[in-house]
Amino acid sequence: MSPATPAPESGGAALELLVHGVGGATPQDMLDDPRTVRITGDRTAAMHRRAEDIDAEAHPERYAARPVPEAYVWSNLTSGDGARALWLLLLPFMVANLAHWMRPPSRGRQELVRLYGVLVRLVALTLTVLLTAAACEVALDLTAWQCAGTAACADTYSWLGFLSADRGGWWSLPGRRLAVAALVPAALVGLLWYLSNRTWSAYEAQRPPTGYDAPMEPTGTATAETQPTGIVTAESQPTGANMPGTATPAAADPFPDPVEQRPALGRPGFWYGRRLVARLRAAHTAAGFLTVSAALVTATARHDATTPGAEAGAVIGLLLRAAVVALSVLVVWVVCRRGRSERRLDLRVERAFVSWLPAVSLALLALTALYAGWYRPGWTSAGALPGDAVFGALTLVQGALVVALGVVALLLQRPGRHPRTALRGLGGPAVAMLACALAGVMSGGVAQRVADWLDGPGAAHGGPRIGPPVLLSWQASVIPVLLLLLLAPAALLAVRTVLTARRLRATVEADYDSADERDPVRTGQIASGRARAALTDSAPVLVGVVSGATLFLGAVSVAGAWASGNVPGQAFDGAHPAVASLASATQALGSWMIGFGFLLFVTWGRRAYRDASARRTIGILWDVGTFWPRAAHPFAPPCYAERAVPDLTWRMSSWTRSTGGRLVISGHSQGSVLAAAAVWQLPPATRGRVALLTYGSPLERLYGRWFPAYFGPEALRALHRTVHCWNNLYRATDPIGGPVRVPAEDGRPAVDAAVLLDPVAYGRTRRHPLPEPILGHSDYQADPAFALRRTALLDQLLPALPRQRDPNETADQGSSGRSSG
């Protein structure tokens, strides 16, 4: 990666701001120099320069013939220390949060947009309840209720001795055993709250910089309003309402925009989610504590209701259950009440009752633990813990919410669906279903493995079996069926890739028509690389198949569990021997697979904690999945863009303000998404001095298709109209980047350049005496076209303005900063 490429011959001072992509990069690699210096920022994210360029602003005469290269390194926002590998366990929460941003574009249907957000937040709430319920299942049911109540199991595990029912200790009563075990899920909820609060302090709580160039902004009375297309328009913005700019736009503009286009990503409050995360964190923390309280009070109150002489306990249990229900309704109301505030920078804090909601729920949990631990002679634990039907109820609720979400998504995209939109606008519901499936696999895997571990002594001595709820066994049994269903589309994609590679051989040879000799092996390698890269466009098919099959098989699991009341192996005892054998085999195989899946998550996380290379791989997952703010689930990994986008916006504003020079922001892969988001945040005057160069960019191929409301065709065209100039480079062998598909309009050229050849040479040539590698997604700057495009962009920008000595000067600069190029 070498930015030291031919520079424009004219134009004055210029800055090339490099932004790396997924997986991270070092400033030494980005700047192609071992001597680099951090000029601003911290260890988490910072701007770097070569040591020789540290004082570039003080000596502009040295850079009249070349730009100043500067690298923004944001790797540690996602893949820094080893503890972040534990974020892998938060994967379902992250996937649910993505579903919020996948809604179709709205066209004047704000009520449907609000309903869509409410449904996604409710799905996210069920995931928190499911995780807590799984912890309750392991700690309260399997361990404290079943194992500690069985002599063979309790005697085998010495650490359960003080809870053993046979030993008759003070803690041996069922209610007291449950109260002690409740500490485990309560501690898990507390840990999630701590992690969310800790990352909130580092990300959402950091107020974005505003008002840097407030005197230079035009003043007015008009305010931003949300239009049906999701674009905010404002003829003039109030002072300090946006990110800093540089100068008041003048009337002489070769690309006049009578109305300033302000997409959702450019709104002042888009990258500041402090208030929403605080509100959702309070609600989800309270929901977790209330789930533990419900598990305690349900079992205890049921015993009191059926025991003569326990009328007082039954009344107390009824009151506690009523309190749990009332607080649960309040939690749901808090989650549904409001979503994000994006039109302005929302600096308000939540009301006291929202802030105190977790504390009140924790106090109620303490009361239910005290109620459960009260002395009740003659109470014994047998069978499974009452109340395990919660898993079936959660599955039904999640299915109903996903179906309702699909209906709302269809209504939103109905007026005009773009053919490139993934799953015809149903990407959000499909991904929400996948989040529920991931949560089910993880929670079921824990319960299955713990049950198998604890059941060993009981099975060996002929004692009562220790097992999880019947529904979890049914859900494990359908996993092999789901994998079989996936074999068909996977096989079809494999066959299609082979056929596509064969068909592309002629195209490859035509692209390299200057080659003297044809090499079938070389041609096959290039054609196969292009065919494999095209598989990315088939991802919606696989996601749709998996989510649809998961929804159907989940309904079958609930029906089978409730109708039979037994695990699949026993539910088909009277059936044909082949059917009974198949049911037993799928149950055993599914139980093994679901447990293996969970162990794989734990092992991968542990390896990533110790291995830097594995940690970098997991960091790549977060680079893609945590770009978006936490709008649905507060326990999801934090949004790194809430730090990176203001960093880039501030840097572009400070450069143009202090030097009046030109700037090209050069983004690779995920860095191109950050660059586009940062440019959207700039005021018009600053955008007039900024050129955008993207390469290997997923802006349309991934974000435009899956997040059409924010990166759809209208949003990308609006970005093209507002930025001074924009070029996009891509290769046919790149599985991630692709064209942005923004055509020429209003005198502006198309954004996409001609597709780059990869490799740059077919065989050995005088210029390339050794075989050139197929680069795919990497090393775009090694292509000669990169230097040519960057030079052309810089030459299109207006020459540098005189340096402003007075930072308070507000005189009109007399130019919008644009050039007809």
Image (spheres, rainbow, N blue to C red):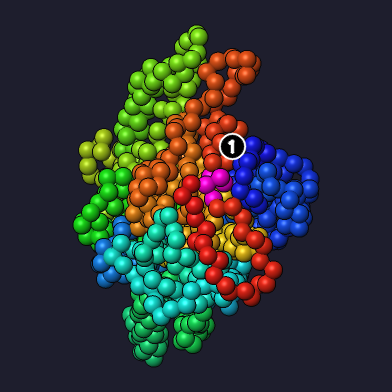
Q: Looking at the image, which residue is at 61% across and 59% down?
A: 801
Foreground of the two, 393 or 789: 789
Foreground of the two, 268 or 436: 268
Q: Looking at the image, which residue is at 44% across and 58% down?
A: 253
Q: Is residue 607 left or right of residue 396?
A: right
The image position of residue 69, as x and y in percent, is 67, 47
In the displayed structure, would residue 2 be above or below residue 316? above
The answer to if 265 sits in the magenta stretch is no
The image position of residue 698, as x and y in percent, is 45, 45
Q: Does residue 122 appear in this view?
A: no
Asked which secondary structure carries label 1, the reply is helix
Foreground of the two, 637 or 257: 257
Q: Does residue 718 appear in this view?
A: yes
Region of the chain picked out in magenta, as a range: 793-797
Q: Amino acid at mark 1?
A: Ala
The image position of residue 82, as x and y in percent, is 66, 53
Based on the displayed image, in which of its 4 quarters is residue 166 positioned? bottom right
In the displayed structure, would residue 296 be above or below residue 521? below
Image quarter in which the N terminus is found: top right
**The furthest residue to the bottom:** 312
The image position of residue 665, as x and y in percent, is 57, 50
Structural crowding at the residue carrying mark 1, measured as other residues with C-alpha within 10 Å and reported as few (<14), some (14–19) or many (≥20): many
**The furthest residue to the top:** 517
What kind of secondary structure does the magenta stretch mostly adopt?
A: helix
Based on the displayed image, in which of its 4 quarters is residue 110 positioned? bottom left
Q: Looking at the image, which residue is at 69% across and 68% down?
A: 805
In the displayed structure, would residue 409 be above or below residue 792? below
Q: How many marks?
A: 1
The answer to if 796 sits in the magenta stretch is yes
Foreground of the two, 135 or 748: 748
Q: Looking at the image, which residue is at 47% across and 26% down?
A: 529
Residue labelled with disc 1:
787
